[in-house]
Image (cartoon, grey):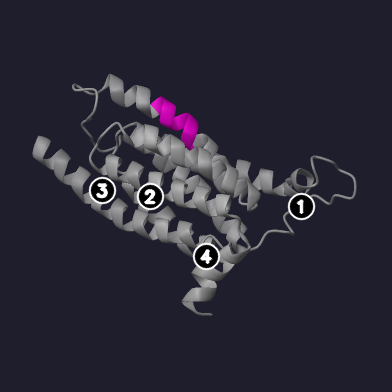
């Protein structure tokens, strides 16, 4: 399979609106990560635009886990926006630190809880896809492919990463690096070439973000 088949051919069946939405969502997603690296509160309004667009896109592509995580992102972005504004001296930038042991324990709890909840949702996916009707529906996980299972995993990874970011913890970048890297092949498999490239950019930016936040904390100390 060549580059054309991976990144261009799937879009031959998409409408102009679908392509525009994905490109716009990817653009605002990159802007959000850029502002996050800068510890700038604009990470949240740009992120909200991106996540709302991807809620629509991912639901239509059957990636329920990632769809759910974008709903969660939107809610957490509002929470983070308020928290960052409260903890910022200039209402724009914030100071960062490492997570405490108690926060790590809560993060692990969030991860396990997310794995369970997303798996349950996929269990009921045939019911959801059948317009919430049980007629002729067989519940179970038999319909999941490898991309769906990766979706379950990355949803849990991103959920914890988003929570750590709202708390201004340096470790949030570790979760973004791992999750973004995993998402690249998943999005190619689902025919979302633009989004797969976005996750490649995200991976690189997350590494930069981790190094910058770590350096910032060291200089503050």
Q: Residues within 10 Å of mark 3 (few under 14, many from 20)?
A: many
Q: Residues within 10 Å of mark 2 (few under 14, many from 20)?
A: many
Q: CA distance from mark 3 to mark 2?
A: 10 Å
Decide: marks 3, 2 in contact (CB < 8 A)?
A: yes
Decide whether the magenta segment is chiefly helix, strand or loop: helix
- For marks 2 and 4 on the same chain, the one whose residue lies earlier in the sequence: 2
> Looking at this view, is 101 or 183 the one in front?
183
Decide: marks 2, 1 in contact (CB < 8 A)?
A: no
Q: CA distance from mark 4 to mark 1?
A: 25 Å
> Looking at this view, is 161 or 39 the one in front?
39
What stretch of residues is rendered in magenta? 73-79
Q: CA distance from mark 2 to mark 4?
A: 18 Å
Quick one: quadrant of the C terminus? top left
For mark 2, give the secondary structure.
Answer: helix
Q: Which residue is mark 1?
A: 140
* Percent of width and height locating residue 10: 58, 66
For mark 4, give the secondary structure.
Answer: helix
> Looking at this view, is 87 or 160 the one in front?
87
Q: Which residue is mark 3?
A: 209
* Percent of width and height locating residue 182: 46, 60
Q: CA distance from mark 1 to mark 3?
A: 39 Å
Q: Tell me the number on the disc at residue 176.
A: 2
Q: CA distance from mark 3 to mark 4?
A: 25 Å
- For marks 3 and 4 on the same chain, the one whose residue lies earlier in the sequence: 4
- For marks 1 and 3 on the same chain, the one whose residue lies earlier in the sequence: 1
């Amino acid at each position: 399979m060549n580059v054309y088949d991976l990144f261009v051919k799937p879009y031959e069946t998409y409408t102009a609106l679908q392509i525009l939405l994905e490109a716009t969502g990817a653009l605002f997603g990159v802007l959000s990560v850029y502002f996050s690296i800068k510890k700038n509160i604009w990470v949240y309004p740009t992120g909200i635009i991106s996540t709302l667009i991807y809620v629509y896109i991912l639901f239509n592509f059957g990636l329920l886990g990632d769809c759910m995580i974008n709903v969660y992102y939107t809610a957490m972005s509002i929470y983070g926006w308020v928290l960052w504004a409260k903890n910022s001296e200039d209402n724009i930038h914030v100071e960062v630190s490492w997570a405490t042991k108690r926060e790590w324990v809560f993060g692990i709890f969030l991860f396990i809880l997310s794995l369970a909840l997303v798996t349950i949702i996929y269990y009921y996916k045939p019911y959801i896809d059948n317009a919430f009707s049980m007629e002729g529906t067989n519940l179970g996980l038999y319909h999941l492919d490898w991309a769906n299972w990766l979706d379950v995993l990355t949803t849990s990874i991103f959920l914890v990463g988003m929570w750590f970011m709202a708390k201004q913890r340096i470790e949030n970048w570790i979760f973004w690096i791992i999750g973004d890297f995993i998402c690249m092949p998943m999005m190619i498999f689902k025919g979302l070439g633009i989004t797969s490239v976005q996750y490649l950019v995200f991976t690189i930016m997350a590494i930069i973000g981790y190094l910058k936040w770590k350096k910032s904390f060291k200089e503050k100390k």
